[in-house]
Amino acid sequence: MNSMNIAIIGSGLTGSLAAISLANAGCRVDLYERLTDEELINRDRTYAITHSSRKILEKNGIWSHLVSHLVPFQYLNVIDFELNKKFQFLIDDLRISDQKYSAVGWIAEHKNIMLSILEFISNIDNVNKIPTSVIPNTNNYDLVLAADGSNSTTKKKLKTPSFNFNYDQMCLTAKVLLRGVKSNEAFEILNSEGPFAVLPLGGDLFQIICSQSIVKGTYNMSLSKSLFLDYLSTILPYGIEPDTIIDKPVSFPINFVFNYTFFSGKYLYIGETAHKLHPAGGQGLNLCWRDVDCITKLVSIPFLRNNHYIIPFIYSISRIVDVLLISIFTDSLVRYSRSNINFFILPRTLIFFILKKSTFIRKLILSLMTNGV
Ligand SMILES: Cc1cc2nc3c(=O)[nH]c(=O)nc-3n(C[C@H](O)[C@H](O)[C@H](O)COP(=O)(O)OP(=O)(O)OC[C@H]3O[C@@H](n4cnc5c(N)ncnc54)[C@H](O)[C@@H]3O)c2cc1C
Protein backbone atom coordinates (compact mmCIF):
# COMPACT_ATOMS: atom_id res chain seq x y z
CA MET A 1 0.00 0.00 0.00
CA ASN A 2 1.20 3.57 -0.73
CA SER A 3 2.23 5.65 2.24
CA MET A 4 0.22 8.85 2.02
CA ASN A 5 1.54 12.33 2.85
CA ILE A 6 -1.03 14.34 4.74
CA ALA A 7 -0.96 17.95 6.00
CA ILE A 8 -3.22 18.95 8.87
CA ILE A 9 -3.86 22.65 9.51
CA GLY A 10 -4.67 23.25 13.19
CA SER A 11 -3.69 21.23 16.23
CA GLY A 12 -6.82 21.69 18.35
CA LEU A 13 -8.44 18.53 19.68
CA THR A 14 -9.66 17.58 16.18
CA GLY A 15 -6.41 18.15 14.28
CA SER A 16 -4.31 16.54 17.03
CA LEU A 17 -6.43 13.39 17.18
CA ALA A 18 -6.43 13.25 13.37
CA ALA A 19 -2.61 13.35 13.40
CA ILE A 20 -2.44 10.38 15.80
CA SER A 21 -5.12 8.39 14.04
CA LEU A 22 -3.69 8.88 10.53
CA ALA A 23 -0.15 8.16 11.71
CA ASN A 24 -1.45 4.92 13.25
CA ALA A 25 -2.99 4.12 9.84
CA GLY A 26 0.51 4.41 8.30
CA CYS A 27 0.36 7.96 6.88
CA ARG A 28 3.14 10.57 7.14
CA VAL A 29 1.61 13.62 8.79
CA ASP A 30 2.74 17.25 8.95
CA LEU A 31 0.76 19.05 11.66
CA TYR A 32 0.70 22.86 11.25
CA GLU A 33 -0.26 25.00 14.25
CA ARG A 34 0.25 28.72 14.89
CA LEU A 35 -0.08 28.50 18.71
CA THR A 36 2.41 27.10 21.22
CA ASP A 37 1.57 23.91 23.13
CA GLU A 38 1.05 26.02 26.25
CA GLU A 39 -1.52 28.19 24.46
CA LEU A 40 -3.27 25.09 23.11
CA ILE A 41 -3.48 23.58 26.60
CA ASN A 42 -4.55 26.72 28.48
CA ARG A 43 -8.17 26.84 27.34
CA ASP A 44 -10.89 26.76 29.94
CA ARG A 45 -13.45 24.34 28.47
CA THR A 46 -15.22 21.23 29.68
CA TYR A 47 -16.47 18.50 27.36
CA ALA A 48 -18.97 15.68 27.61
CA ILE A 49 -17.31 12.56 26.17
CA THR A 50 -19.57 9.86 24.69
CA HIS A 51 -19.04 6.18 23.90
CA SER A 52 -18.31 7.00 20.23
CA SER A 53 -15.30 9.05 21.39
CA ARG A 54 -14.30 6.34 23.86
CA LYS A 55 -14.17 3.81 21.00
CA ILE A 56 -12.08 6.12 18.77
CA LEU A 57 -9.64 6.81 21.62
CA GLU A 58 -9.41 3.07 22.39
CA LYS A 59 -8.66 2.26 18.74
CA ASN A 60 -5.81 4.76 18.83
CA GLY A 61 -4.36 3.52 22.12
CA ILE A 62 -5.06 6.81 23.95
CA TRP A 63 -8.04 5.80 26.11
CA SER A 64 -5.92 4.17 28.85
CA HIS A 65 -3.84 7.41 29.09
CA LEU A 66 -6.91 9.63 29.32
CA VAL A 67 -9.37 7.67 31.40
CA SER A 68 -7.85 8.68 34.75
CA HIS A 69 -8.54 12.35 33.82
CA LEU A 70 -12.20 11.72 33.05
CA VAL A 71 -15.12 11.84 35.46
CA PRO A 72 -17.72 9.17 34.64
CA PHE A 73 -21.41 9.73 35.25
CA GLN A 74 -24.02 6.98 35.66
CA TYR A 75 -27.16 9.13 35.50
CA LEU A 76 -28.09 11.77 32.96
CA ASN A 77 -31.11 13.64 34.32
CA VAL A 78 -33.19 15.56 31.81
CA ILE A 79 -35.43 18.09 33.50
CA ASP A 80 -38.16 20.21 31.96
CA PHE A 81 -37.91 23.13 34.40
CA GLU A 82 -41.16 24.75 33.23
CA LEU A 83 -43.20 21.52 33.55
CA ASN A 84 -41.32 20.43 36.67
CA LYS A 85 -40.87 16.96 35.14
CA LYS A 86 -37.81 14.75 34.90
CA PHE A 87 -36.56 11.50 33.36
CA GLN A 88 -33.19 9.78 33.51
CA PHE A 89 -30.92 8.08 31.01
CA LEU A 90 -29.31 5.12 32.78
CA ILE A 91 -26.56 2.65 31.97
CA ASP A 92 -29.30 0.10 31.13
CA ASP A 93 -30.41 2.42 28.29
CA LEU A 94 -27.00 2.00 26.57
CA ARG A 95 -26.16 -0.70 24.03
CA ILE A 96 -25.16 -3.97 25.77
CA SER A 97 -21.55 -3.60 24.54
CA ASP A 98 -21.29 -0.13 26.13
CA GLN A 99 -22.87 -1.08 29.46
CA LYS A 100 -19.73 -2.80 30.82
CA TYR A 101 -17.99 0.62 31.06
CA SER A 102 -20.42 1.57 33.88
CA ALA A 103 -20.82 5.10 32.55
CA VAL A 104 -23.46 6.87 30.49
CA GLY A 105 -20.63 9.24 29.54
CA TRP A 106 -17.61 11.09 30.92
CA ILE A 107 -16.71 14.71 31.65
CA ALA A 108 -13.29 15.98 30.60
CA GLU A 109 -11.49 19.23 31.28
CA HIS A 110 -9.73 20.61 28.21
CA LYS A 111 -6.34 21.08 29.87
CA ASN A 112 -6.06 17.41 30.86
CA ILE A 113 -7.02 15.88 27.54
CA MET A 114 -5.10 18.38 25.37
CA LEU A 115 -1.94 17.80 27.44
CA SER A 116 -2.26 13.98 27.22
CA ILE A 117 -2.90 14.08 23.47
CA LEU A 118 0.07 16.42 22.81
CA GLU A 119 2.32 14.16 24.91
CA PHE A 120 1.08 11.18 22.92
CA ILE A 121 1.90 12.95 19.62
CA SER A 122 5.46 13.72 20.79
CA ASN A 123 6.12 9.95 20.91
CA ILE A 124 4.94 9.23 17.35
CA ASP A 125 7.68 9.23 14.71
CA ASN A 126 5.59 9.91 11.62
CA VAL A 127 3.95 13.10 12.95
CA ASN A 128 6.00 16.21 12.25
CA LYS A 129 4.80 19.30 14.16
CA ILE A 130 5.41 22.55 12.26
CA PRO A 131 4.89 25.82 14.20
CA THR A 132 3.50 28.03 11.45
CA SER A 133 0.19 28.95 9.87
CA VAL A 134 1.43 28.83 6.27
CA ILE A 135 1.90 25.60 4.32
CA PRO A 136 4.88 26.25 2.03
CA ASN A 137 3.84 23.88 -0.76
CA THR A 138 0.60 21.90 -0.78
CA ASN A 139 1.81 19.96 -3.87
CA ASN A 140 3.84 17.85 -1.43
CA TYR A 141 0.67 16.38 0.05
CA ASP A 142 -1.88 13.81 -1.12
CA LEU A 143 -4.53 15.33 1.16
CA VAL A 144 -4.80 18.51 3.25
CA LEU A 145 -7.06 18.39 6.31
CA ALA A 146 -8.35 21.79 7.44
CA ALA A 147 -8.88 21.55 11.22
CA ASP A 148 -8.37 25.26 11.81
CA GLY A 149 -11.63 25.84 13.68
CA SER A 150 -14.89 27.67 13.04
CA ASN A 151 -13.12 30.84 11.80
CA SER A 152 -11.08 28.78 9.34
CA THR A 153 -8.95 30.91 7.04
CA THR A 154 -8.52 27.87 4.78
CA LYS A 155 -12.26 27.70 4.19
CA LYS A 156 -12.42 31.44 3.49
CA LYS A 157 -9.49 31.21 1.08
CA LEU A 158 -11.16 28.37 -0.81
CA LYS A 159 -14.54 30.21 -0.71
CA THR A 160 -16.40 27.11 0.53
CA PRO A 161 -20.03 28.04 1.24
CA SER A 162 -21.65 27.28 4.56
CA PHE A 163 -24.94 27.82 6.35
CA ASN A 164 -24.33 30.01 9.45
CA PHE A 165 -26.38 31.83 11.99
CA ASN A 166 -25.85 33.34 15.44
CA TYR A 167 -28.15 32.21 18.23
CA ASP A 168 -29.48 35.30 20.02
CA GLN A 169 -27.88 33.73 23.07
CA MET A 170 -24.59 33.54 24.93
CA CYS A 171 -23.10 30.73 26.96
CA LEU A 172 -22.00 31.24 30.57
CA THR A 173 -19.74 28.69 32.24
CA ALA A 174 -18.39 28.41 35.77
CA LYS A 175 -17.10 25.84 38.24
CA VAL A 176 -19.33 25.64 41.29
CA LEU A 177 -19.51 23.58 44.49
CA LEU A 178 -23.04 22.18 44.80
CA ARG A 179 -25.03 20.54 47.61
CA GLY A 180 -27.83 18.02 47.13
CA VAL A 181 -26.43 16.31 44.01
CA LYS A 182 -24.45 13.08 43.67
CA SER A 183 -20.99 13.13 42.08
CA ASN A 184 -22.08 10.57 39.45
CA GLU A 185 -25.01 12.53 37.99
CA ALA A 186 -25.15 15.00 35.12
CA PHE A 187 -28.10 17.26 34.33
CA GLU A 188 -29.56 18.80 31.18
CA ILE A 189 -32.13 21.34 32.39
CA LEU A 190 -34.49 22.75 29.81
CA ASN A 191 -35.64 26.16 30.98
CA SER A 192 -37.19 29.03 29.05
CA GLU A 193 -33.88 30.95 28.80
CA GLY A 194 -32.22 27.98 27.08
CA PRO A 195 -30.65 24.62 27.95
CA PHE A 196 -28.51 24.51 31.08
CA ALA A 197 -26.04 21.67 31.78
CA VAL A 198 -24.60 20.65 35.16
CA LEU A 199 -21.59 18.37 34.70
CA PRO A 200 -19.72 16.51 37.47
CA LEU A 201 -16.00 17.26 37.91
CA GLY A 202 -15.43 15.01 40.97
CA GLY A 203 -16.70 15.30 44.56
CA ASP A 204 -18.96 18.33 45.03
CA LEU A 205 -17.42 20.23 42.12
CA PHE A 206 -19.56 20.79 39.00
CA GLN A 207 -19.21 22.71 35.76
CA ILE A 208 -22.29 24.69 34.86
CA ILE A 209 -22.84 25.60 31.21
CA CYS A 210 -25.93 27.73 30.74
CA SER A 211 -27.21 29.40 27.62
CA GLN A 212 -29.32 32.51 27.92
CA SER A 213 -30.36 35.66 26.11
CA ILE A 214 -27.55 38.15 25.46
CA VAL A 215 -29.26 40.78 27.66
CA LYS A 216 -29.67 38.43 30.61
CA GLY A 217 -26.23 36.82 30.12
CA THR A 218 -24.49 40.22 30.00
CA TYR A 219 -26.31 41.27 33.17
CA ASN A 220 -25.42 37.99 34.97
CA MET A 221 -21.76 38.33 33.95
CA SER A 222 -21.67 41.72 35.71
CA LEU A 223 -22.91 40.27 39.03
CA SER A 224 -20.66 39.76 42.05
CA LYS A 225 -19.92 36.12 42.94
CA SER A 226 -22.48 36.11 45.76
CA LEU A 227 -25.23 37.58 43.57
CA PHE A 228 -24.34 35.11 40.80
CA LEU A 229 -24.75 32.29 43.35
CA ASP A 230 -28.16 33.70 44.31
CA TYR A 231 -29.11 33.73 40.63
CA LEU A 232 -27.95 30.11 40.19
CA SER A 233 -30.13 28.99 43.08
CA THR A 234 -33.18 30.24 41.14
CA ILE A 235 -32.41 28.16 38.03
CA LEU A 236 -31.14 24.95 39.67
CA PRO A 237 -33.71 22.19 40.31
CA TYR A 238 -35.37 22.03 43.71
CA GLY A 239 -33.05 20.44 46.32
CA ILE A 240 -29.76 21.49 44.64
CA GLU A 241 -28.00 24.41 46.32
CA PRO A 242 -24.93 26.28 45.04
CA ASP A 243 -22.30 26.76 47.77
CA THR A 244 -19.24 28.47 46.25
CA ILE A 245 -18.03 29.64 42.85
CA ILE A 246 -14.51 28.39 42.26
CA ASP A 247 -13.55 30.60 39.30
CA LYS A 248 -14.89 33.71 37.64
CA PRO A 249 -17.71 32.84 35.20
CA VAL A 250 -16.71 33.16 31.53
CA SER A 251 -18.95 33.67 28.53
CA PHE A 252 -18.80 33.06 24.80
CA PRO A 253 -21.18 33.71 21.88
CA ILE A 254 -23.07 30.79 20.34
CA ASN A 255 -23.31 30.25 16.62
CA PHE A 256 -24.19 27.49 14.19
CA VAL A 257 -22.07 26.52 11.18
CA PHE A 258 -22.82 23.79 8.65
CA ASN A 259 -20.72 23.51 5.51
CA TYR A 260 -22.65 22.67 2.35
CA THR A 261 -19.73 20.46 1.41
CA PHE A 262 -16.93 18.97 3.53
CA PHE A 263 -14.24 19.17 0.86
CA SER A 264 -12.71 21.37 -1.82
CA GLY A 265 -10.25 19.66 -4.20
CA LYS A 266 -7.81 17.78 -2.00
CA TYR A 267 -8.78 19.81 1.09
CA LEU A 268 -11.07 18.09 3.62
CA TYR A 269 -12.86 20.02 6.36
CA ILE A 270 -12.88 18.32 9.75
CA GLY A 271 -14.12 19.33 13.20
CA GLU A 272 -15.38 22.84 13.80
CA THR A 273 -14.12 23.91 10.38
CA ALA A 274 -17.00 21.84 8.96
CA HIS A 275 -19.71 22.20 11.63
CA LYS A 276 -20.30 24.04 14.86
CA LEU A 277 -23.24 23.38 17.16
CA HIS A 278 -24.94 24.95 20.16
CA PRO A 279 -23.24 23.50 23.28
CA ALA A 280 -26.59 22.00 24.47
CA GLY A 281 -26.46 18.22 24.34
CA GLY A 282 -22.64 18.07 24.56
CA GLN A 283 -22.24 16.76 21.01
CA GLY A 284 -19.63 19.17 19.55
CA LEU A 285 -16.30 17.47 20.24
CA ASN A 286 -17.71 13.96 19.77
CA LEU A 287 -18.96 14.88 16.30
CA CYS A 288 -15.51 16.36 15.48
CA TRP A 289 -13.80 13.12 16.51
CA ARG A 290 -16.19 11.03 14.41
CA ASP A 291 -14.94 13.04 11.38
CA VAL A 292 -11.43 11.86 12.29
CA ASP A 293 -12.60 8.24 12.55
CA CYS A 294 -14.29 8.45 9.15
CA ILE A 295 -11.25 9.83 7.33
CA THR A 296 -9.01 7.23 9.02
CA LYS A 297 -11.28 4.39 7.86
CA LEU A 298 -11.19 5.74 4.30
CA VAL A 299 -7.39 6.05 4.08
CA SER A 300 -7.10 2.50 5.47
CA ILE A 301 -8.90 1.05 2.42
CA PRO A 302 -6.17 0.01 -0.10
CA PHE A 303 -8.25 0.91 -3.18
CA LEU A 304 -8.95 4.43 -1.90
CA ARG A 305 -5.34 4.91 -0.83
CA ASN A 306 -4.22 4.14 -4.37
CA ASN A 307 -6.91 6.47 -5.74
CA HIS A 308 -6.70 9.11 -3.03
CA TYR A 309 -8.17 11.89 -5.19
CA ILE A 310 -11.68 10.41 -4.60
CA ILE A 311 -11.30 10.30 -0.78
CA PRO A 312 -12.48 13.93 -0.19
CA PHE A 313 -15.73 13.31 -2.09
CA ILE A 314 -16.45 10.00 -0.31
CA TYR A 315 -15.61 11.58 3.07
CA SER A 316 -18.04 14.42 2.41
CA ILE A 317 -20.86 12.00 1.49
CA SER A 318 -20.09 9.70 4.44
CA ARG A 319 -20.28 12.44 7.06
CA ILE A 320 -23.34 14.33 5.91
CA VAL A 321 -26.07 12.22 7.62
CA ASP A 322 -24.42 12.06 11.06
CA VAL A 323 -23.58 15.79 11.08
CA LEU A 324 -27.01 16.80 9.77
CA LEU A 325 -29.00 14.65 12.22
CA ILE A 326 -26.91 15.67 15.26
CA SER A 327 -27.20 19.34 14.20
CA ILE A 328 -31.00 19.04 13.90
CA PHE A 329 -31.23 17.15 17.21
CA THR A 330 -29.15 19.77 19.07
CA ASP A 331 -31.00 22.71 17.54
CA SER A 332 -34.37 21.06 18.37
CA LEU A 333 -33.28 20.75 22.01
CA VAL A 334 -32.64 24.52 22.10
CA ARG A 335 -35.97 25.33 20.42
CA TYR A 336 -37.86 22.92 22.72
CA SER A 337 -36.26 24.53 25.78
CA ARG A 338 -37.11 28.08 24.67
CA SER A 339 -40.60 27.35 23.33
CA ASN A 340 -43.43 29.19 25.06
CA ILE A 341 -44.77 26.85 27.73
CA ASN A 342 -48.29 28.35 27.47
CA PHE A 343 -48.59 27.36 23.79
CA PHE A 344 -46.62 24.12 23.94
CA ILE A 345 -47.70 22.66 27.26
CA LEU A 346 -49.49 19.72 25.62
CA PRO A 347 -46.74 18.56 23.22
CA ARG A 348 -44.10 19.05 25.92
CA THR A 349 -46.12 17.04 28.45
CA LEU A 350 -46.63 14.32 25.84
CA ILE A 351 -42.92 14.20 24.89
CA PHE A 352 -41.93 13.88 28.55
CA PHE A 353 -44.57 11.23 29.20
CA ILE A 354 -43.30 9.13 26.24
CA LEU A 355 -39.65 9.52 27.25
CA LYS A 356 -40.37 8.54 30.83
CA LYS A 357 -42.45 5.48 29.90
CA SER A 358 -40.82 4.17 26.72
CA THR A 359 -37.51 2.40 27.23
CA PHE A 360 -37.33 1.90 23.45
CA ILE A 361 -37.48 5.66 22.67
CA ARG A 362 -35.01 6.45 25.47
CA LYS A 363 -32.59 3.86 24.10
CA LEU A 364 -33.00 5.23 20.58
CA ILE A 365 -32.23 8.82 21.66
CA LEU A 366 -29.32 7.80 23.87
CA SER A 367 -27.92 5.70 21.03
CA LEU A 368 -28.06 8.74 18.70
CA MET A 369 -26.44 10.97 21.34
CA THR A 370 -23.72 8.54 22.34
CA ASN A 371 -22.88 6.67 19.12
CA GLY A 372 -24.03 9.07 16.41
CA VAL A 373 -25.48 7.80 13.14
C1 LIG B 1 -14.86 29.72 23.64
C2 LIG B 1 -15.24 28.28 23.35
C3 LIG B 1 -15.72 27.50 24.38
C4 LIG B 1 -16.11 26.19 24.12
N1 LIG B 1 -16.61 25.44 25.14
C5 LIG B 1 -17.00 24.18 24.89
C6 LIG B 1 -17.55 23.38 25.93
O1 LIG B 1 -17.72 23.84 27.06
N2 LIG B 1 -17.90 22.09 25.63
C7 LIG B 1 -17.73 21.55 24.37
O2 LIG B 1 -18.03 20.36 24.12
N3 LIG B 1 -17.21 22.30 23.37
C8 LIG B 1 -16.86 23.58 23.61
N4 LIG B 1 -16.37 24.33 22.60
C9 LIG B 1 -16.19 23.69 21.29
C10 LIG B 1 -14.91 22.84 21.33
O3 LIG B 1 -13.88 23.62 21.83
C11 LIG B 1 -14.57 22.26 19.97
O4 LIG B 1 -15.64 21.41 19.58
C12 LIG B 1 -13.28 21.45 20.03
O5 LIG B 1 -12.25 22.24 20.58
C13 LIG B 1 -12.81 20.93 18.69
O6 LIG B 1 -12.46 22.00 17.90
P1 LIG B 1 -11.42 21.95 16.69
O7 LIG B 1 -10.15 21.26 17.03
O8 LIG B 1 -12.18 21.48 15.50
O9 LIG B 1 -11.16 23.51 16.53
P2 LIG B 1 -10.34 24.46 17.50
O10 LIG B 1 -10.32 23.97 18.89
O11 LIG B 1 -10.87 25.82 17.24
O12 LIG B 1 -8.87 24.32 16.93
C14 LIG B 1 -8.45 24.93 15.74
C15 LIG B 1 -6.94 25.10 15.81
O13 LIG B 1 -6.47 25.56 14.54
C16 LIG B 1 -5.46 26.54 14.79
N5 LIG B 1 -5.37 27.37 13.58
C17 LIG B 1 -6.30 28.24 13.10
N6 LIG B 1 -5.88 28.77 11.93
C18 LIG B 1 -4.66 28.21 11.67
C19 LIG B 1 -3.73 28.34 10.61
N7 LIG B 1 -3.95 29.14 9.56
N8 LIG B 1 -2.59 27.62 10.66
C20 LIG B 1 -2.33 26.79 11.71
N9 LIG B 1 -3.18 26.64 12.75
C21 LIG B 1 -4.33 27.33 12.72
C22 LIG B 1 -5.95 27.29 16.01
O14 LIG B 1 -4.88 27.96 16.65
C23 LIG B 1 -6.52 26.15 16.84
O15 LIG B 1 -5.56 25.58 17.70
C24 LIG B 1 -15.99 25.65 22.82
C25 LIG B 1 -15.48 26.46 21.80
C26 LIG B 1 -15.12 27.75 22.06
C27 LIG B 1 -14.60 28.60 20.93
Image (cartoon, helix red, strand yellow):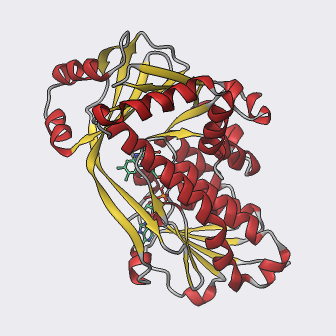
Give the vertical position of 111 relative to 362 (above or below).
Answer: below
Q: Report the quarter where the N terminus lies.
A: bottom right
Say which of 107 and 191 sits in front: 191
Give the vertical position of 343 relative to 175 (above or below).
Answer: below
Quadrant housing residue 50: top right
Q: Residue furthest bottom?
A: 139
**Residue 86, position as x, y percentages in the image:** 47, 21
Q: Is residue 232 left or right of residue 56?
A: left
In percent of the image, x 79 and y 68: which residue is there?
A: 300
In percent of the image, x 56 and y 86: which residue is there?
A: 138
Give the vertical position of 164 relative to 100 (above or below).
Answer: below
**Residue 326, position as x, y percentages in the image:** 54, 52
In which quadrant of this rendering is ligand 1 seen? bottom left
Say which of 146 and 36 sits in front: 146
In percent of the image, x 35 and y 35: which residue is there?
A: 344
Q: Is residue 80 left or right of residue 202?
A: left
Say which of 329 and 27 sits in front: 329
**Residue 94, position as x, y percentages in the image:** 70, 32
Quadrant housing residue 149: bottom left
The total number of labels drawn is 0
Asked whether residue 197 appears in the rendered view, the answer is no
